[in-house]
Amino acid sequence: MQVPAFEWIKNLMTFTLFLQHIVNALSLGSLYALLAIGYTMVYGILRLINFAHGDIFMIGAYVAFYGTALFVLPWWASLLISIVFTALFGIGLERVAYKPLRDSPRISIMISAIGASFLLENLAVLIFGGRPKGVEVPKVMGQVLNIGSVSFLGVSLFIPIITFGLFVLLMWIVNGTKTGIAMRAVSTDIETSRLMGIDVNRVVSFTFGLGSLLAAFGGIMWSYKYPQLNPLMGVMPGLKCFIAAVIGGIGNIGGAVLGGLLLGIIEIMIVAFFPTLSGYRDAFAFILLIIVLLVKPTGLLGKRQAEKV
Amino acid sequence: MLEINELSVHYGGIHALQGITMKVEEGRIVTLIGANGAGKSTALRATVGLVKATAGTVVWNGTKLTGMPTKDIVTLGIALVPEGRRIFANLTVEENLILGAYTRTNRQEIRSDMDRVFELFPRLKERIRQKGGTLSGGEQQMLAVARALMAKPKLIMMDEPSLGLAPMISKMIFDIIRTINKSGTTVLLVEQNAKAALEIADYGYVLETGRIALEGPGKELLADDRVRKAYLGEAQG
Ligand SMILES: Nc1ncnc2c1ncn2[C@@H]1O[C@H](COP(=O)(O)OP(=O)(O)OP(=O)(O)O)[C@@H](O)[C@H]1O
Ligand SMILES: [Mg+2]
């Protein structure tokens, strides 16, 4: 039997559509991965869930927005400034909200993290205003690219590529440099790290800086992909990316990336193929979390480790 | 020279060190022995600033260490091989050694010191890419000592390095301690194995519930009746 020509064309169309979804899924997944890395690194070092991490993501996006909208800087300049500023901001947050509580019971520092998150969100409402702000998307990011019959926004292609580059760089820092070895040492045994002459505070600051930098980058790219800012924009991505980090195995950077990508891909695919379920898109993360934890309680790439209390 | 003067440490209500005074002269092997819970580890930990002294001072070649952060004390040339080895289980043997040399910057010197350490512990060289956690207990102890040596310390303090080791390995560790000392490193050794420790020590201190009960040259303490009875497990006679 021969397949009628129109049938064949229809199949081709769905395949094109499928590729388009793949690009979208990869870019959303990469954004999740960028944010999830920060959760996992901070948890790895301090056994702390940095609830304010999603707000760091939001701050990164706003700073870049004001760089172009208020100070009329070129987009790449405000991107760089925002990344540096947000990294310093993350370091400052740790100094003010977490460091004084490092020797207190775990619950105190968790509560401080929740407080910091609410504070940042409310300050953002106060300073940036509660009304959503429209972002002017840079031309390269907003242009429509066509590869064959597949077309997508520039930003959707750039995100996975740059994320991959950042990931390679991060793995090199963690596995190939002395600072990276020190980071891993601090994450297993702070006291013995001190005995090696490691400045633990500096390693912690470095970790917060790195995590915040990636979150800022993620926030800015997010604002190019979904060009609207509001002070609570970090809440849902923050929650999902924390889940992504747990799914991948918290404390494991590769796991965070895997969890983020998985979450992004599943979210886009389910919405694409089961449009009736799209109202529940935020719930998929939780369902996936439950499934993964039932099958492998340590997360996909997580190793069992004694809880340090 | 390390001088510990009237050093006191409290853990909450527990007065773990009750004003101990000790001296470790350059080039010597000095040992600190005592029963479980006497405060030996506490003395070493207070020296490197891992626990806070509540009174008294520790002075190293004229510099007051009390109150200094650990990383600065370590940088002055004092290394501690902690009780229970405390190697980084998730790092390779090589990475553990690199961390031992964390405060140093001259890469060439670090490289050649690593080679020297491997001469001392050939078994570590064979396991250079292995994760620390997969080493045997004896190998982990070797790594803990090797890691401390990578700091090129002037004073190396060891907290029960022979604990839980087979007699052969234990003897090897004591031989190594002597070798390290011969090459010019001062040693402060905390031991449960009082006999082996006093045999290689120039001078010894006996700690009893937070106080120095006895002190003297190693040979003299070995011959002392009280020491023989309490720490060498010999029947009275
Ligand atoms: N972190 C701590 N908190 C409370 N008490 C402690 C702490 N560390 C030690 N102690 C107490 O201080 C005393 C001295 O302990 P320390 O570890 O210095 O003894 P030690 O001589 O090294 O014993 P061992 O030979 O068993 O290693 C003990 O009574 C111990 O229970
Ligand atoms: Mg002890």
Image (spheres, coloured by chain):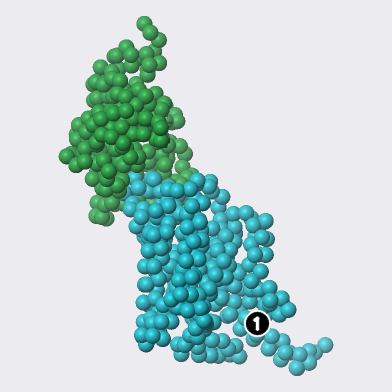
Chain colours: A cyan, B green
Up-down relation of residue A88 to residue A77 (above or below): above
Q: Residues within 10 Å of mark 1 (few under 14, many from 20)?
A: some
Residue nearest the observer in this picture, A251 or A1: A251
Q: Label 1: state its secondary structure.
A: helix
Residue with the most extreme left position: B62
- Residue located at (26% from left, 34% from top): B56
Residue with the most extreme bottom position: A5
Image quadrant of ligand 1?
top left
- Residue located at (37% from left, 30% from top): B15
- Residue located at (26% from left, 52% from top): B104
Looking at the rendered image, the quarter that the N terminus of chain B falls into is top left
> In screen coordinates, is B209 left or right of A148?
left
Residue nearest the observer in this picture, B146 or B64: B64
- Residue located at (38% from left, 59% from top): A95
Residue B49 figure quarter: top left
Looking at the rendered image, the quarter that the C terminus of chain B falls into is top left
Q: Position of residue A251 (x, y in %)?
A: 51, 57
Residue assigned mark 1 = A18
Residue type, mark 1 in image: Phe
Q: Can residue A168 be seen at all in this image of the molecule?
A: no
> In screen coordinates, is B148 left or right of B63?
right
